[in-house]
Amino acid sequence: MNTPSRVVFVTGCSAGFGFRCARALARAGHHVIAGVRSFSVHGQRYAAELKGLRAEGHTVQLVPLDVDHDHSVDTAVRAAMDAFGRIDVLVNTAAYSVLGPLEACRPEQLSAMLDTNVVGALRLFRAVLPIMREQGSGRILQLTSGLGRVVLPFMGVYAASAWAQEAFAEALAYEAAGFGVEVAIVEPAGYRKGGRPRKPVGDTARLSAYSDALIEFGERVNQSEPAGGDPEEVARAIIELVAAEKVPLRTPVGAAAVELLRMRRTMTAEAFEQEIYRRTGLHAVYEDDEEDAEVGAVMTAAEVPSHPPTRGEGG
Ligand SMILES: NC(=O)c1ccc[n+]([C@@H]2O[C@H](COP(=O)([O-])OP(=O)(O)OC[C@H]3O[C@@H](n4cnc5c(N)ncnc54)[C@H](OP(=O)(O)O)[C@@H]3O)[C@@H](O)[C@H]2O)c1
């Protein structure tokens, strides 16, 4: 392997991108500390697979980690330092998303999500930065989303957390550069196979007012690209960012993210807005009589089911 081994702390390793990143990083020869919150059935399976990598000669250490709690974050980071004496890279993926109309999101549901996705990121930054400053080097890779700079209907609650994660990471990139610490934002979209279902918004009475629009929206999403992209692309992007001599501030990952962000950058605000109405079927003014070859990108970024979410659905 050409890349030197790094000590990489990955959060959210009981599922999805975190698990895939931890596995790929270990196989690439890095020393991985994998933060795992729950050992539920799926969590146990992924944790067992990560532990199994040790038998193949890879270095993976699992630590309990709930990013909602200062103590848990501090204990996990201390365990990493005890094991390896340094942390070269933080890969922060621990987060979840909420789906549904803003009106139907209960305030406490928003607060809980922000505590995990945004305050959780802050807890991790605060825990690793003194170590990286002392080392005179370090790299923080913050996973956000293709919705970290764009908003789609029914994704506003989640997008608020992704935008906040981006703001934190961008500010930190400036503030930490003088200490030799680099920050990179990774923006995936369109990986429905990779993650668990989004949590539905909590207020079912209000939700019913949006049923027709949600069904229409979900059908368009599912028609556009039912299978979604290969979530291993995200792990490969992380491997490249760990190995790179210098990292860009932002890396969109996946065709849907690239296309969505390109549209946002190249279209006027008004044209983009009209396009979102048209492609989501949410507005009667914009006729949907022209088939657009680009329709898949915006649709897959949203990853919604073909029916309105109910209380029982989601993680
Ligand atoms: N999948 C996609 O296409 C996609 C695209 C763009 C952005 N994203 C976003 O990227 C993030 C990760 O996505 P994913 O697909 O990997 O999701 P996922 O499969 O649901 O995995 C999320 C991971 O984060 C962990 N986590 C959640 N809350 C935590 C907490 N309080 N403390 C510690 N760990 C916690 C989960 O642990 P538990 O097992 O204990 O719940 C799980 O390991 C989400 O915010 C998602 O919306 C996903």
Image (cartoon, grey):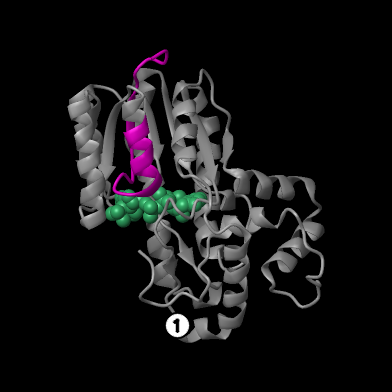
Q: Position of residue 147 (x, y in %)?
A: 58, 53
> Residue shown at 54%/26% (left/top)?
247
- Which residues lie in the magenta part? 1-24
Q: In the picture shown, does residue 205 fall above or below 281? A: below
Quadrant location, the N terminus: top left
Q: Which of the 4 quarters of the picture holds residue 314?
A: bottom left
Report crowding for label 1: few under 14, some 14 to 19, many 20 or more residues within 10 A (C-alpha).
some
Can you see residue 38?
yes
**Residue 193 among those drawn in magenta:** no
Locate residue 53 relative to residue 27 in the image: left or right. Answer: left
Locate residue 233 relative to residue 108 in the image: left or right. Answer: right
Which residue position is annotated with label 1?
204
Amino acid on which disc 1 is placed? Thr
Q: Which of the 4 quarters of the picture holds residue 4?
A: top left
> Residue shown at 42%/12% (left/top)?
2
**Residue 18 among those drawn in magenta:** yes
Locate residue 189 relative to residue 44 in the image: left or right. Answer: right
Quadrant location, the C terminus: bottom left
Q: Position of residue 248 (x, y in %)?
A: 58, 29
